Image (cartoon, coloured by chain):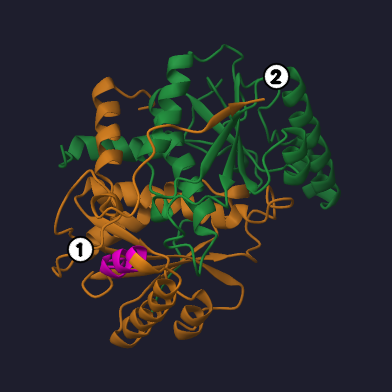
Chain colours: A green, B orange
Amino acid sequence: MEHFSTDFRAGLHDLMRWRRDVRHFATDPVDEALVTQCLDTFHLAPSVGLSEPWRIIRVASDTARHAALENFKAANADALAGYSGDQAALYASLKLSGMQDAPEQLAIYCDDGTEKGHGLGAGTMPEMRRYSVVGAINLMWLTARAHGLGLGWVSVLDPDRLNRDLDVPEGWSLVAYLCMGWPRVNTVTPELETQGWEARASHLHVERR
Amino acid sequence: MEHFSTDFRAGLHDLMRWRRDVRHFATDPVDEALVTQCLDTFHLAPSVGLSEPWRIIRVASDTARHAALENFKAANADALAGYSGDQAALYASLKLSGMQDAPEQLAIYCDDGTEKGHGLGAGTMPEMRRYSVVGAINLMWLTARAHGLGLGWVSVLDPDRLNRDLDVPEGWSLVAYLCMGWPRVNTVTPELETQGWEARASHLHVERR
């Protein structure tokens, strides 16, 4: 069905409003079938030249999770050291990852050297492969939220260290470390806004040429 | 409303199936209110540290459009030169942009130097700002499709040349050149698959650590 109703469009708008970066998860497990359904969203995502360069690592073992959490803690301490005064105090009070609780954790990679797609569309802008992975993640985010699941994107990580710890193939680049699970709270307001770090802009920057 | 029905989820899945990269556009204009509604999707998109680094240029003048089209033609000729034999013939037959017809054309940039968000989450992975822009584009893509609009992402372009031609501020990086308008055909099959360039994978690459 290629036509979408006014009701559906209103629902889509709602879905995007309720999609949040979640850092507070219940520890309840997520059904394997639901995880698969979320991951299947990747099949529907656009990719440059149909290269489908996404590679997914489910970070499941205690060892792998511990390494990722230690990585985050070190990167977060470094980041904190870059702020001072009130801003440092505020930064220190923020919860920037749900890695301690989230039942599902995914490291999402891009295979920059994939032959799939025969390089089409990635000649002048090779970053298009990584952008394709980012797009797919955003679609999965919506699918997860439509099922009531929360997703949190952790970027306070040293990618090289994670690659070593996860023994990732040569040529893959980290795009995202995702926490997934049942959110403790649902809200339409970003946590960084509630906590006073930054507010959403009311105005979109549009120029004309 | 934070709960989503089975019907809505089926509609979301349909929407993602019908979202395609469109290169064949009718020349009919798109209502200004609808363009605005699509662009407003940016306000709902996640961004690292709430940095909202997206900057939008509506490429509207004949001069700017001509420059972008010439840029595409040159980059496309260079890309063609990288293929040989049957693959070159096939590449030459592909339509990789709707720039000649699409009534709306947008150059989407990332302001890598924005102070908004105070650098949060972008210390070890500064590319997160550009990834935020990519995510927002993918949400807009769904909004457009829900209204029956098609969107085509052109990446066969020399970004530096486009930046000069559009007189873009220092520190902005091109993320996407988008064509938007009414698609001539609606389909669930990617054009690159129909034309035999590449097929979608049936299997998702998932590993466990």
Residue type marked 2: Ser
x, y (%) of residue B116?
62, 58
Above or below, A29 against A113 in this view is: above
Which residues are drawn in magenta?
B86-97
- Seen at 51% across and 38% down, the residue is A189
Q: Is residue A56 left or right of residue A44?
A: right
Q: Is residue A148 visible?
A: no
Pointer 2 with pointer 1, Cβ within 8 A: no
Q: Quarter of the image holding residue A65?
A: top right
Q: Which of B136/A58 is in front? A: A58
Secondary structure of the residue carrying numbered label 2: loop
Above or below, comparing residue A162 to residue B57 in the picture: above
Give the percent coordinates (x, y) of residue B120: 69, 49
Q: Quadrant of the N terminus of chain A?
A: top left
The answer to whether residue B204 is seen in the rendering is: yes
Q: Main secondary structure of the magenta part?
A: helix
Would you name the residue on which mark 1 appears?
Answer: B24
Query: What chain does badge 2 belong to?
Result: A
Q: Position of residue A114 (x, y in %)?
A: 53, 50
The answer to whether residue B158 is above or below residue A31 is below
> Magenta stretch: residue A111 in it?
no
Image quadrant in which you'd find residue A180: top right
Amino acid type of the residue tagged 1 in the rendering: His
Could you tell me which chain the residue with mark 1 belongs to? B
Residue visible at 66% across and 62% down in the picture: B115
Q: Residue at x 35, y 50 (%)?
A: B198
